[in-house]
Amino acid sequence: MSCWKTASGIEFDMKALGIDIGSLTTKAVILDSGQIIASSVIATGEEAEQSARTAVNEVLKQAGLKLDGGVAIVSTGVGIKDLFPGQQSKSLTTCLARGIHRLFPSVRTSIDMGAESSTVIRVNERGRLNDWVNQDKCAAGTGIFLQQMARLMQIPLAEMATLSLQAKGRADISSTCAVFAESEVISHVHREPPTPKEDIVAGIYYSVVSRVVSLCKRIGIERDVAVTGGVALNRGLVKILESELGLAVLVPEKPQLVAALGAAVVAQENIERGIGR
Amino acid sequence: MTASEARSNRISAIIRACRIITRMSQANPDAPKSDVLYYKMLSDYYTRLLNAHDEGKFIAAHTVFFPSEILYAMDIVPMHTETTTWMMALFLGGQAEILSAGAELGLVPEICSPHRGLAGAFSLGVLPRPDAMLWSNLICDNTAKSGELVMELNKCPGFFLDHPFQRSEAEDKYLVSELEDMIHFLEEKSGRMMDWDKLSDIVARMDYQTELFREIGELRKAVPSPFPNRGFLQLLTVDYLCPGQPEAIAYLETLRDELAEMVRQGKGAVSPERFRLMTLFVPPMYLMGLIEKLGHEYGVVSVVEPLFTRWAEGRLDPSKPLESVARKAAMMPERRSMYGPLGQEALQDLIDCAEQYKVDGAVYWAFMGCRHTCATVKLFKDVLNEVDVPVLTIDCDIVDPTINSEEEIRGKLEQFFELLEDR
């Protein structure tokens, strides 16, 4: 139990709530004494503010709590500030570092593959961010790019992973531009004979992975390495990433929740340090 | 509007902007006197340029890192092309028009924007027409093509000053011979003779000027550091436009005295000072206001810029003026880390800076147009990481605002300040 004392000596039980407002999904986590007691993932609607409220209400309901001053809130992701009383905002990289350290304290490099950007962070032994680099100039190398490719090939996203594991070869797909990559995929589909779907999917994954691996090389890879974000749920892509990095990576059970968890960890630290009450 | 009117309008607008800032600074009792001198220096420089042809003077356009001391000694009016381009961007916000004109000449966005801009500005006819174009290969690679392009656009003669890449006695002699050839070229084209006594005087002042730069550098080591983030560009400009000129000395002496007084009183440029930064390369000039604002908001101050404001030890000898002009090129901060074989000495200097200036973090403004400098990003970052200095690298452009949004740069800086706070 995380308690704090008022000046008159009354003890309150505080819970730590973290929100990560992403461009595709909004995630929320509640921690009590370091344990996750509730979590939610909802699609981010047109109004990010409304999505944040919905995600928070859902975790509060799961945990049987109310926003009555007994919850410390830290948010990250799309910049929504001052939505909840006493809410603090932290950068995505800080939250990713705290989140992955909470799950895997041995991790020193973590690759976050989100909907609109990929970020590689270096974490120290205290879970503090040492360095980061992100790919935010082009959709190539992101979750949205994979979604777009799935739509283009008329294959459900989940099936793409299975297909890639069956590939015998790999189509060459540009890793520098999402628009060019799309044209290349179309030409692979329509050429005579068409490139096998499995090989096209493997090529798409390689193009994403090569982009991410170049980020890793820029920042330097130190073991252990973890992969987080929604794209980490894709087994086929993670397998190719492992092969390109030449090492096994750690993937959390719910990789899309790591930043929200990290935000909750910061909220927990705030409770312990008496900040934001 | 005629081309001649367009020229007058742009330069006049820079002069007007400088004069307004000068008057505002004079009227503000809290404004540093050095600011008044700095903006007066700029307005005088551009007034000389604007009136040059009417007064029968010869205008020599030149690229960055060019020894304009020679021009001052010959009573030739210098026009620093890259600085004038970014002055237009800073004061007039006219980047889009001149960069677009540069694009029409075939210059792609990956090319250095001050060079795209200067080509565009000459093409639009918004810079005074030079009587000669001078350029060198010192530090900047883009100058080679810009020099030829400016000659072609203005149908003027030009001279390429060849700087040796390595340094040795033989190469120093070669550079002196190149300077002699350039003086002959200028004498022939302008009809003006070199005034060697004047050059000696300029060298004597330049020697003092480098001492002033070093003194200012020493004062910035104080905790809290007294020099504001926006001051970095002023230090660059003063040497780029007015090397060894009395107005440069007056500005630097006043600035030194103001900083010394602040140090004596324990005052910092930001209060409270929380983080001391090393700045590598140049921040986007059109975002200097944002950087200054964030500095105050987060208590962040740039205390050292090893690539641009840290002059090497050494003296200039007025009795050997040409040798001294050549020697100055070797002492320039830019030469030490961005030109010539990059050795352990330059890397050690970064480590020394980090320690001496008690640096908490470094920001590398990776200007994509300056490719040879960007080659050092990883090298510098690794060296600084070894002494526990985190480095933020921001891919950017120093003049073209279409490459990054202000929001993106603000986000990255805030993230970095959070990292520093969290350590």
Image (tube, rainbow, N blue to C red):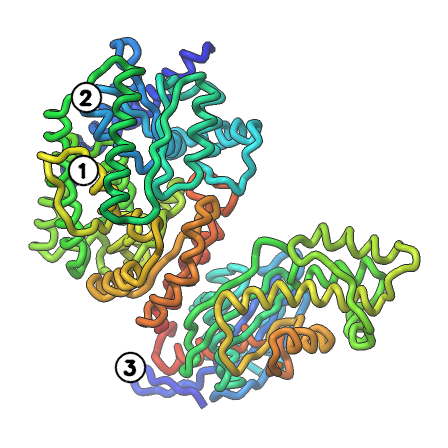
**Which badge, 2 or 1, is on the more N-terminal residue?**
2
Residue with the mark numbered 3: A7
Write the residue at 49% across / 86% down.
A106
Residue A210, horizontal then vertical, whole percent? 64, 65
In the current view of this chain or complex, which residue is farthest to the bottom? A1
Q: Chain of mark 1?
A: B
In the image, A130 versus B148, the foreground residue is: B148
* Distance Cα–Cα, label 1 vs label 3: 74 Å
What SS does tag 3 mark? loop
User: Tag 3: residue type?
Assistant: Ala
In the current view of this chain or complex, which residue is farthest to the right? A193
Write the residue at 49% across / 52% down.
B408
Indicate which disc residue A146 carries: none
In the image, A41 versus B398, the foreground residue is: B398
Q: Chain of mark 3?
A: A
What SS does tag 2 mark? loop
